[in-house]
Image (tube, rainbow, N blue to C red):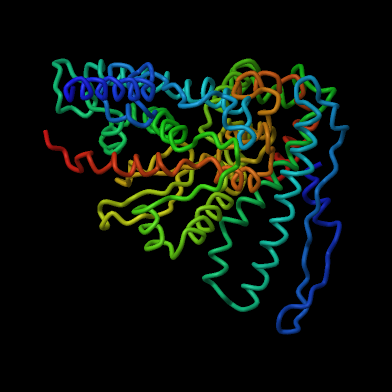
Amino acid sequence: MLSAVSASVAESILPKTGALGTLVARLKHTLPDLPYDYNALEPYISADIMKLHHQKHHQTYVNNLNAAEEQLAEAMHKDNINQIIKLQPVLKFNGGGHINHSIFWEVLSPNGGGEPTGDLMHIITRDFGSFDRMKEELTNVTVAIQGSGWGWLGYNPNSFRLRVAALPNQDPLQPTTGLIPLFGIDVWEHAYYLQYKNVRPDYVKAIWNIVNWNAVSERLAAAKQCS
Amino acid sequence: MAVAVKKRNVFQISIFFGILTYSNGDAYPYQCIREIKEEYTLPTLPYGYGDLEPYIDEATVKVHHTGHHAAYTKKMNVALQQWRNDPVEGVTIKNTNHLAEKSILDILKEIEEVPQKYRKALTNNGGGFVNHNIYWSVMSPNPENKERLPREPLLSDINKNFGNFSQFVDIFTKDALALFGSGYVWLSRNPLDGNKLLVSTTANQDSPISQRFQPILVLDVWEHAYYLKYQNRRPDHISEWWKIVDWNVVEKLDNWWKDIPQHDEL
């Protein structure tokens, strides 16, 4: 299930006429559905937050990504390198936002929590000493993020090891660090503020109750196949 | 007769200033940033938590002040104390020329000189402390939704640097909308460029003071500044915020900077 992103990408390929009459095939991104109801993650994440987070924030990243890609197509069409470069930040913000949130919805579940089993548990124990130590490291790194960002558990396809990483804003894990994202925690204030206010540690502590270890295991299996 | 009248006027003036000042002796939160302190205190707001309604809701002001600003204050004090008592990096003999012994304003001005060990903590928490001190200062209640404008000579300066006031508002607002993630939008003077006014942004708790600018107006666009009332609707928050900007205080702050020495005169 590497993705909602690839699913939405495959969903609609629109032929579009460029400025000079050339056909430009375009992929239009769409907001993936949540695999559960808005209230399904309560009491750990409120329905209000889930609704806003999905319908407003994630939708905005999708809309802005589509708009930026249209501008990119036009800039490439006109061979306007300056404009191509100028679009990089907005592509990163919104592309990263779409990627990150698409992963996030999948790796949470109302039936989640507890501890992983199988290969994932084995590799966590191998690389961190114990599940609790991985949990502590990811928690601390995530809580310590200044401003907006994400904490990640990622897989290094070169060393075959798990790593914890924190990234600012919507910087996507794989293009930025090479790590393949397995599980992420969104600590932009919009992810928790309505419920937890400034007490980010409580939110990060709560999220461990809804980790979808099955989905994370599947992501690990897929990541291993890529390396 | 003339002497009695004079005495009464002095008495009245004292009462007036007495009402203006707060428990820590400062009229506005920004003033304490140039003081050298063992430990800084969270400044009292110049208004009640609910007084910025309906533009900023009471719950937000309260958490913003007692939660976020208080945490930055506390962590800044910890970092300052650790630095000052560091046997290697700090001072074993009290040396008033040492950066650690200066005010948080001076420390932020020379943030690159802070030892690596303490730089991040002071950038984030010292910045957080100072940024919020300025933020609270430049807002005031506007219960009657009166239009607010800067007056001379600041208005002329704004016109000179931005064309006219409404163009300035546009530029500032556009920057506030475009800022991705957490940060601030500032109106500052640049003393290294003929004291010109400029609009700039900083990420997280970075301060334009570290760029040697003199900030006189700030808008906090961290989500915590508006999420409880506006959620993702940052544009609405921004347009409402303009109504509580207190241009009299912006002017005071502008004048306050003129009294601060630009260079280390010690």
Residue B255 location (% of width, % of height): 29, 43
Is residue A74 placed above or below B123 in the rendered structure? below
Residue A19 location (% of width, % of height): 71, 80
In the displayed structure image, the side of residue B165 where residue A209 appears, left or right: right
Residue B32, picture quadrant? top left
Most foreground residue, B229 or A72: B229
Please tell me which residue is depicted at 57% across the width and 47% down the height of the picture. Answer: B180
Residue B10, picture quadrant? top left
Residue B65 location (% of width, % of height): 51, 24
Quadrant of image for the C terminus of chain B: top left
Say whether residue A136 is visible: yes
Most foreground residue, B24 or A166: B24
Residue B246 location (% of width, % of height): 46, 41
In this view, the residue farthest toward the bottom is A20
* Figure disc tally: 0
Please tell me which residue is depicted at 31% across the width and 22% down the height of the picture. Answer: B12
Most foreground residue, B179 or A114: B179
Please tell me which residue is depicted at 69% across the width and 35% down the height of the picture. Answer: A182
Quadrant of image for the N terminus of chain B: top left
Say whether residue A160 is visible: no
